[in-house]
Amino acid sequence: MPLPETILNVVAEMGPLFTAPTWRKLMILLTGTLLAHGRRTVCSALRFSGEQHTENWSLYHQVLNRARWSPLAASRCLLQLILETFVPADAPIDIGIDETLERRWGAQISKRGHYRDSHLSSKERSVSSPGLRWMVMAVVVTPNFCKQPWALPFLVVLTTSPSVSESLGKRHKTIAMWAAQMISLLHRWLPDRQFRVLGDSAYNVLELGVHASKRQVSTITSMRLDSVLRELPPPIEQRRKGGKPQVVGPRLPSLEQVLADPETYWQEEELLWYGQGKRKVQWCSGTALWYRFGSPPLPIRWVLTRDPEGKRESKALMCTDPSLDALRIIRTFMKRWSLECTFEESRAHLGIETQRQWSDLAIERSTPLLLATYSLVALIGHQLACHKSIHIEQTAWYRKTAATFHDVLAAVRQLIWHQQIIPTSGSDPDVGLLPRSTLDRLLFAACF
């Protein structure tokens, strides 16, 4: 079942990364993955692509567990496609980074561990679930078919817990270590571009900020209210004589003290709050050096936000680019939430957590490929929207004003199915011939 030309044009640049036989199998699996409902196993993809009677079906499993191709090269190619399509050449690139838990069971999954399950946990109770913890980097863009930012994954890493690393005989890497390695990759791939990495409190690590700043990458993360902040060191002529040279000045009041101080000057602004309409937010900001003995001082801009009505708890943000203004930091940090939407939509519509591979190589390739499919759907949707607006599904009980991922995926599926219709008359374009094999697959998609 060949893919439409619109889709082939999007993925064509990745073709040279694979051998010709592997590329043909991968396109069949991509077709089935886009059309499938429910589980996204290899066999399910073969069913929906019309290859369920292929005798050498086991060769398609080898694309994941045996074929030689570089996921890093594919990640770099996908990143370049996303930037060429959505981000101007002179614009800064917003990169969301976060972890997600893929719940999996099975003794043969060697990198399975127990991690905090944010879906089942609350502030009062922490629940862990067995599974695989993936660390995802995604470009945050606003496509031409909607108004909300989308996070398009391009780099996915499988991390392990300390106990799993010990059982595998490998040196354990923390989340901050993995993030530093991924930031180094970004800088190596595109040394002339400006990146802003957006993360939660797990990425509020001094060593990570210093590592990123050395590579001209700024980070925007949430921050602890009790962080130790210091002033700039005094001029040389005012410094103390003898001893080690001063690298920082006196300690500044903590953000907890700033929050409680009645003399603090707060500014107020009405902002679009996580897609929930406009809300009034009060904020104050300042610059400081984030310092800990043994590490070089890191210049930052801190931003403290609070709800004027007192309904939401106050939060602190930090940016390693002190020249960035506070409002830009707040607006940019809120884009990070689009990555959480990507995780949820990938589970709902692309079958994340339904794979059944158990070999290490297949596991390390299947989930990143499914997340990359999310980005490919957005790229294909952009091409479709350039010629015709994406149809937005409407109901009597819910009115949508912009296309969602489900709408774009439906448009891609319709594009694939429409290609199977054979026109029978030039004078009557409404009449077409539907092959029996296509009808059988449509019935399978509707009934199973």
Image: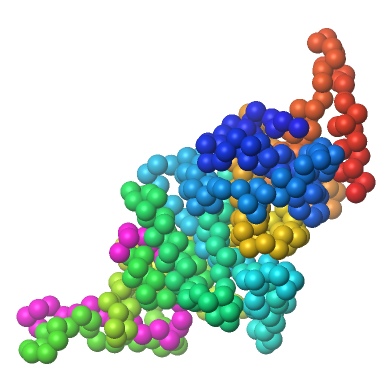
Q: Quadrant of the N terminus?
A: top right
- Quick check: 40 above or below 207? above
Residue at position x 77%, y 44% in the image? 57
The image quarter containing residue 186 is bottom left
- Quick check: 120 above or below 13? below
**Residue 262: image location, x then y, percent:** 42, 86
Residue at position x 16%, y 80% in the image? 234
In the image: residue 414, left or right of residue 232:
right
Is residue 269 highlighted in magenta?
Answer: no
The image quarter containing residue 364 is bottom right
- Seen from the viewer's position, the closer of residues 290 and 307 is 290
- Seen from the viewer's position, the closer of residues 128 and 165 is 165
Residue at position x 40%, y 84% in the image? 227
Is residue 235 highlighted in magenta?
Answer: yes
In the image: residue 36, left or right of residue 371:
right
**Residue 406: image location, x then y, percent:** 73, 48
In the image: residue 238, left or right of residue 57:
left
Residue at position x 33%, y 65% in the image? 213
- Seen from the viewer's position, the closer of residues 429 and 332 is 429
- Is residue 94 in sight in this rendering? yes
**Residue 426: image location, x then y, percent:** 81, 10
**Residue 148: image location, x then y, percent:** 60, 52
Q: Which residues are magenta?
A: 214-238
Query: Exactly how many numbered labels are in the figure?
Result: 0
